[in-house]
Amino acid sequence: MGRSEKTAKRETFEGLRPRVLVGAITKWFGQVRRDLPWRVVDPATGMRNPYFSLVSELMLQQTQVSRVLEKFGQFMERFPTAAALAVASEDEVLSAWTGLGYYRRARLLHAAAKVIVERHGGQVPSDLDALMALPGLGRYTAGAIASIAFGKAAPLVDTNVSRVILRVGGVDVAGDDKAGLAWVWEQAEVLAVAAHKQGVVAEVNEGLMELGALVCTSDNPACLVCPLRDVCKARAMGKQREIPRAKKQAARKPVVHTVLVLSTADGRTLVERRAGTGLWAGLWQAPTIEGAKPASEVELRGRVGVLGKVRLGTLRLRQDEDFVFQTTHRDVTFRVYRGEIAAEKMIAESATHTFLAKETIAELGMSSPMRRILLDGTQQTSGDAAGQESQRVKADGVKRAKVIQTKRKNGVKQRDD
DNA sequence: AACTCGGGGAG
DNA sequence: CTCCCAGAGTT
């Protein structure tokens, strides 16, 4: 390709000049950038710690900054280096990940740490292709680490960047439009190359995301304080709130998890590991029967009684109030029964089922609802419905259950009516 | 190309 | 209620 063609391509950002955008973003980012824990700079090298970037980027995939802030520090304390992470057990890693969701990321990060130790001497590689070859790193994450931690001329596109670029370019497509996304990546590359020439590729890439997170938000863009307000085509057209158009969302499927929390007199509880695929794969739980409708007490007793060939027919069970836990693809109704046995020898432990103390259970990888069931006591909520709403659940056999929504911190939001 | 994988916050 | 979020891997 000739030089003129290359030059022409550099100017296809709908007539916008990359240098202008680079300058505006860099200046703005320098003024407002947040102090996030993974943005620390090593005073010795003047560089960001690439391992911090690796961990934070994996955590940030499809996850908001505020959510990652709650987990990042603790994770780094437990696994301060790639080598420390590589030698940890998978359960330790999953435990540190509990509550973040998309648990596959934790396993992939763990696997990436092992590759980094075995093939890269324990140092996160700086080469884009080497980064892409690591488990769990796709085009976005590899580009983020290469550009932000190593200052390489690599582009990056997440949903923030995609929204900013589509709006600035005035491209009216859905957020998951394939051709639109390809175009966005081209523009991101133009920007990254231009920024790299000026030595500010890290600032521009991170600044683009910061802009999308703080100013060019999806619901209510704050155009008046936007550094790109004068060049933004969506704003000129008054379409900044319509671009990008919403993606189609799949309906959630109702399912029911019937759970038996079986405890011993000395305070230990029976737990098992979930199957290796599907929802909450490989995480720990109290014995659970999953189905379209709630399992009966008889079925639940049978599920556990079979373990040690012991009948639990005489065991008295208490039933919690049902609650619904929502994930992206499911409404999971939890029906929880609790019972106590005199001695754990009533049920033989096995490779897959074991009685553990509460402190030990707290160290297992578990889903958020299971953590509540096992560690926060019962879900009785009578007289304490603040912040919760009810909805009719379509699952058979479940009349109505509270949807667990926001976990209020003490004193932050008490009912005041 | 479509689906799957969590969880919580905000409007 | 709905939509969104520093995406990637599998089918």
Image: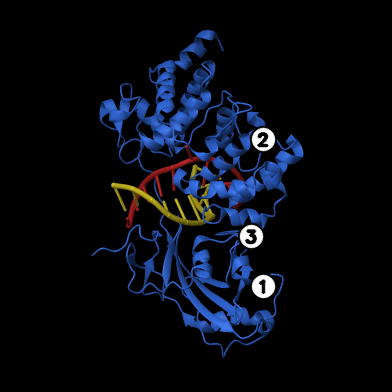
Chain colours: A blue, B yellow, C red
Q: Chain of mark 2?
A: A
Residue wearing tag 2: A124
Estimate the spatial distance between the alpha carbons at disc 2 and disc 3, rounded to whole Å. Answer: 28 Å
Relative horizontal placement of residue A374, taking residue A353 as reference (left or right)? left
Amino acid carrying label 3: it is Gly
Residue C2, horizontal then vertical, whole percent: 34, 52
Q: Quadrant of residue A345?
A: bottom right
Relative horizontal placement of residue A144, taking residue A307 as reference (left or right)? left
- Sequence-wise, which precedes: disc 1 or disc 3? 3
Estimate the spatial distance between the alpha carbons at disc 1 and disc 3, rounded to whole Å. Answer: 18 Å
Inspect this view and state whether residue A211 appears: yes
Nearest the camera: A391 or A179? Answer: A391
Inspect this view and state whether residue A138 appears: no
The secondary structure type at the circle numbered 3 is loop
Residue A394, horizontal then vertical, whole percent: 38, 68
User: Is residue A16 placed above or below A213 in the rendered structure?
Assistant: above
Amino acid carrying label 1: it is Thr
User: Which numbered dot is residue A276?
Assistant: 3
User: Which numbered dot is residue A354?
Assistant: 1
